[in-house]
Amino acid sequence: MLTLTPSRVRLGWVAENKAEAIRLVGQVMVEAGFISPAYVDSMLEREQVSATLLGPGIAIPHGLPEARDLVLQTGVVVVQFPAGVAWSQDGHARLVVGIATRSDEHLQVLAHLTDVLGDEARVEALSSTRDIALVVEALNVPGTEPVPPAAPVPDGPSLQVRSPSPDGLHARPATVLVEVVRRFRADVTVHHEGRQASARSLLSLLRLGARGGSTLTLTAAGDDADAVLLALRDAFDAGLGEATSTPSPRTAVVLDYEGAWVAGLSASPGIAAGPVWAFQRQRLEVEERADDAAREHLLLDAALAGAATELRQLHEGFLLKVGARRAAIFKAHLELLDDPELRSETHGLIDTGLSAGEAWRRVFESRAEALAAMEAPVLAARAADLRDVGLRVLRPLARAQEAAPLLPDHPVVLLAEDLAPSDTARLDPARVLGLCTAGGGTTSHTAIIARSLDLPAVVAVGPAVLALRNGQHCILDGDAGVLVVEPSEGDRAKAARQRERLRQRREAEKLERYRPAITLDGQRVEVAANISEAAEAARAVEAGGEGVGLMRTEFLFLRRDEPPGEEEQLHAYRAMVRALNGLPLILRTLDIGGDKHAPYLSLPAEENPFLGVRGIRLCFEREDLFRTQLRALLRASKEGPVRIMYPMVATPEELTRARAITESVRREVGAAPVETGIMMEVPSAVMMAEQLARDVSFFSIGTNDLTQYALAMDRRHPALAPRVDGLHPAVLRMVALTVKAARQAGIWVGACGGIAGDPAGAVVLSGLGVTELSVAIPSIPAVKALLRGISMADAEAVARAALACTTATEVRSLVRGLLERKGTNA
C-alpha cells in the first residue's frame, strides 16, 4: 500500500521544464529514502517511451521496469507546481506524483487519481492550495477499505488466468484480449476482485484496474464458449503480447536530446528551433441537430467504417516502419472505434435529435479524455492520436470550410498533415523555420518544397504531432528525422551549436560552388537546378548550377482562373534563357493531373488520377494548350539552348505523336531544331528504353513518380508514403536498365527526382552512370562538394552492391559507410 504523509508533500515549487521537474521530484524521493539517485535517470528515460501525464494537471513519473532494483522502499511524494510545467503535447502538469514501487502498486495510485481527475474543480484547488493536509486527504490511496464481495460467477464454461506481468491489464494486452474474443460467437466476462467487464469492450476492461499477476476469472456463453476459452488460455499463456520484459528497440538514430521527441523520416537536412504552428486548410462544422435519425445512424456507421479502413492501413504501414509494439496503438484505436459502449451511446444521442457529427463529437471527446485518464502510462502520450481518430470519423460528417491559413508575424516550424503543390503559394519562407508533417514520405511535396526553400523537414511522424499547441517551442532536427517537443536548455544549446556548424559548412561549400563536380579520379557529373518559376533561373546560376535540368512549366498554369497565353509564356521562358546566359534550359511540357489540378481545365473526376489523364496524355487531350506552349518554348529557343522534355511518356507511340506535334509547331514558328527528351518515370518506359532512346537526345529519370509506380505505392498515402524511397533496389535496377539503353544509343541520362539531391542518392545515381543531377537550388553547392570528395570507382562499387540489396535501408547504410570512410559530410 502506498500512503502519502505530509512530510512527502512540497507546495509552491517552480520548474523551467519537465526534466527539471522530474529531477526535483526525484530529489524529494531520494531524501525520503525511497530510491537511489540513479533511479531519477530511469524516470527521465521513462518519459522517452511515453509521457506520464495522467490527465489535465496531474503527472505520475516513475522509472522503467528494469530499474526497480534501484527502489529502496515503497513510497509516494507529491510536488506542486502552481504555474504548471509543460509535460507533453497534451498539456501541463501542476501536481507531480512521484511513485517508488517494485511491484504494480502504482496501479492503486492510478485508479484513485482517476477519480480525482473527474472533478476539474478539485484538481484546480489542489494545484493552487497552500494547505498540505488538503493534498494528503485528497490523494492518499485508501488502504483500509474492505474489498467488495465477489459477485457470483455464473454457471457454465470458465477459466482462471493471471493478469499479464509486470504492468497488468493495460491498453495493449486488453486490446489483444478483445481481438481474440471477437473472432468467436461468444460473450466473455472478466471477473476481478468483485468487479466484472465485457471482454468485447476495451474501456470496460481498462476499468477493472487488474494488476500484474492478479487472478482473473473468465466466463463464456454462446455457441463458441468452449473454443473461445481455449483460445484465451493460449493468449494469456503468451502474455497477451506482454510476455517479455525486454525493452523494445529504440529508433536506429542515436540521439542525446533530453526532451521528449517523436521520430519520422528526414526529408530535408538542417535544424530549426522555435514555436510550432499548425497549417490548416479547413475547419470542420457540424449541424447540432437533425430531423432524420435513421439517415444519421447510417451516416455514422459509414464514417466509422471509413475511419477503421484508414486505421488498418496506418497499422500496416507503421508495423513495417517501427515494429509491432509501437504500431499497436492503432489497433487499440480500432478497438475503440468498434467499442459497443461507444457506438451505443453515440447512436443513443442521435435518437434524441442530435446529428451524427454532433453526437460523435460529444461522445468521442469525453471517451478520449476518460481513456487517457484511466491509462496514463500507456495512453496519455497518445491522446493526440485519439483526437486524430475522432477527426477521421468527423470529417465525412461535417462541412469542410476552406479557410486561408493564418501564420503569425514571427517565424515558426510549420506542422501539417502534408503539403500539396498549391500550398507553396501560401508559404512565406521568411516566416517558416522548417516543416514537419504527420504523413508523407521523402518523395512527398513537403520534401520537395522544403529542399527548394532550404528548410529542414521531417515527415511521417504520425498524427500526434498535429495536436501540439500553436506557439509551443520545439526543435526540428532534419538530419536525425525527429521533432523534439519538450527541449531542455541543453537541447536548445545543442541545436544552436549544430546550426552554427551547418552554417560554417555551407559557407565553405558556397565559396567552392562554381567549381565543377569532378570526382577524385577525374569523372565529371553535371549538377543543375530544378526550378518552378522564371525568377529562380538567376538564383540557380548564383548557386553554382550548371544549367536547369527541370523547369516545371505547370506552375505557370496553377493558381489562376485561365491558362497563360503564348506571349505570357514566351516572356517567362525568354527571361530564363537570358538569365542562364548560355547554360542549358530543359523545359518540361505541361504536367498537370495526378496531384496537380487547374480548375479551369474542367477535367472529369477520376477514381485514380495518378493512373489517369496526366502529363503527355493531358497534352494530347488538350492539344490546343500543348501547341500554344510549344510555340512559346520554340520561340524562346531562338535566344539560347532550350531543350524540350515530355512528361509521363509510357509508350513509343506517345513519343512519336509528341515529336510530330512539336515538329509541326517548329516549322510554323521558324525555329531551328532543338534537343528533345523524355521523363523516365513509368515502368513501361524503362522496359521500352531501347526503342525510346532511338528518338530522343536524352533521358531524365523522375525518381519520385518512378518509385511510386514501381512499388505500386501512392506517395501521398498516409500509411505507405514513408516506404516510398527512391533508393529501393527495385527502383535502382530500373535506373540501371535506363542507363544501359541510353549508352547503347549514345545519349546521356540525367535525374531530376528527389534522390538526386539526397547525399546517398547522388552517390548511387552517379555510380550507376547518371551524368547529370538536377536538384533543388539550395542543394547545389552541397551535392557538388560531396561528389568532389569521392572517386567514381567508389561510387560504382557502392552502386553495384546496392543493386544486390533488398531494402532502401540497406542501400543507405552502404553509402553511409562509404562517406564515413572518406570523411565526407553527408
Image (cartoon, grey):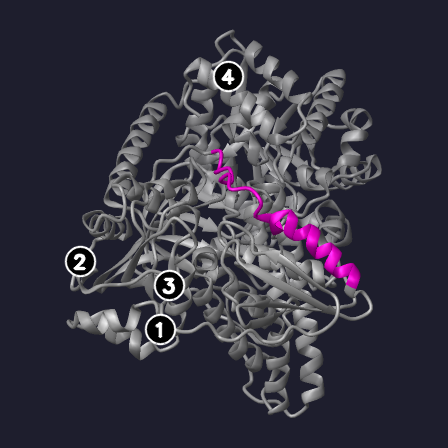
What residue is shown with label 3?
109
Element carrying mark 4? helix
The x, y position of residue 694, in whole percent, is: 79, 24
What residue appears at the point 51 percent right and 8 percent down from the top-left corner?
522
Looking at the image, can residue 428 be seen? Answer: yes
Which three-letter amino acid code belongs to the residue tagged 1?
Val
> Residue 94: horizontal and vertical position, in percent?
26, 64
Inter-mark Cα distance, 3 to 4: 53 Å
Looking at marks 1 and 4 on the same chain, the residue that comes earlier in the sequence is marked by 1
Badge 2: how crowded within 10 Å, few (<14), some, or many (20+)? some
Cα distance between the residues tagged 2 and 1: 23 Å
Residue that mark 2 sits on: 14
Residue appearing at x 30%, y 79% in the figure? 121
Where are the magenta residues, as a range?
Answer: 226-252
Mark 2 and mark 3: Cα distance apart in space:
24 Å
Report which residue position mark 1 lands on. 116
Seen in the picture, residue 430 relative to 657 is either above or below; the reply is below
Q: Nearer the viewer, residue 344 or 663?
A: 344
Which residue corresponds to the image point at 23% horizontal and 70% vertical from the top-left? 135
